[in-house]
Image (tube, helix red, strand yellow):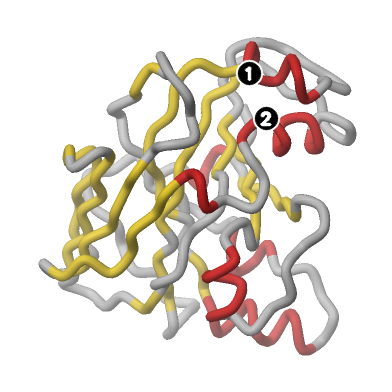
Amino acid sequence: MKIICIGRNYADHAKEMQAPLPKTPIFFMKPETALLRTRDFFYPKFTSELHYECELVLKIDKVGKNIQEKFAHTYYSSFTLGIDFTARDLQKKCKENGLPWEIAKSFDQSAPLSKHWIEITDSAENITFELEHNGVIVQKGFSQDMIFTFDQIIAYVSKFITLKKGDLIFTGTPAGVGPIQIGDHLKARLFDKEVLSFYVR
């Protein structure tokens, strides 16, 4: 199982990061060990600037390579929410030196994932979600605001990487990303239903 993450897939997030809008999907990988398997998240010692990024996550249902966009919808049937934790200080140093920045994105437990999957029965264009940080809503996302749709992402990524059953695709974060501290509480909701909740230890 692999975790594929899409970067800069919301225009408002690209703006807040002072980054140009992509012409094609930008993606990077997280290992399976990035999944949060404990109840709470433990703040890593190698960073002092850790940011949350709440995202819609797809689960791939079957093997596919060079998938045409018109058939992409047959490769997934459910979605949930996850968080792409980013060590922003490490990422900044990597970017300044022209280096890959997996060290800032792919560390252990950097991908908390809800266990509550929602089946896609209608259009995937009207999904709403939000992230609450210590009782304050800090991110609100709408799937129709994505630069690249689920199907476009799958078609593009599968040109380079064979998708397999169980693979996860984090589809990008909206604006509102920010830092966390030990003792913080994060809650994520899909359609106003809480699907993910944990503390930072």
* Residue 22, placed above or below residue 149: below
Comparing 201 with 150, the one in front is 150
**Label 1 sits on residue:** 73
Task: Name the secondary structure under disc 1.
Answer: helix
Q: Are marks 2 and 1 in contact (CB under 8 Å)?
A: yes
Report the residue at 55% width, 58% height from top.
Answer: 107
Q: Is residue 149 left or right of residue 198?
A: right
x, y percent for residue 185: 17, 63
- Count the numbered circles shown: 2
x, y percent for residue 60: 59, 21
Q: Which mark, by number, is residue 151?
A: 2
Q: Earlier in the sequence, mark 2 or mark 1?
A: 1
Quarter of the view holding residue 190 = top left
Comparing 60 with 151, the one in front is 151
Report the residue at 65% width, 58% height from top.
Answer: 7
* Residue 75, placed above or below residue 8: above
- Can residue 201 be seen here? The reply is no
x, y percent for residue 112: 38, 47
Mark-to-mark CA distance, 2 and 1: 6 Å
Q: Amino acid at mark 2?
A: Asp
Q: Amino acid at mark 1?
A: His
Report the residue at 59% width, 78% height from top.
Answer: 15
Report the residue at 26% width, 50% height from top.
Answer: 188
Look at the image and tell me in which quarter the C terminus lies: bottom left
Look at the image and tell me in which quarter the N terminus lies: top right
Q: Which mark, by number, is residue 62?
A: none
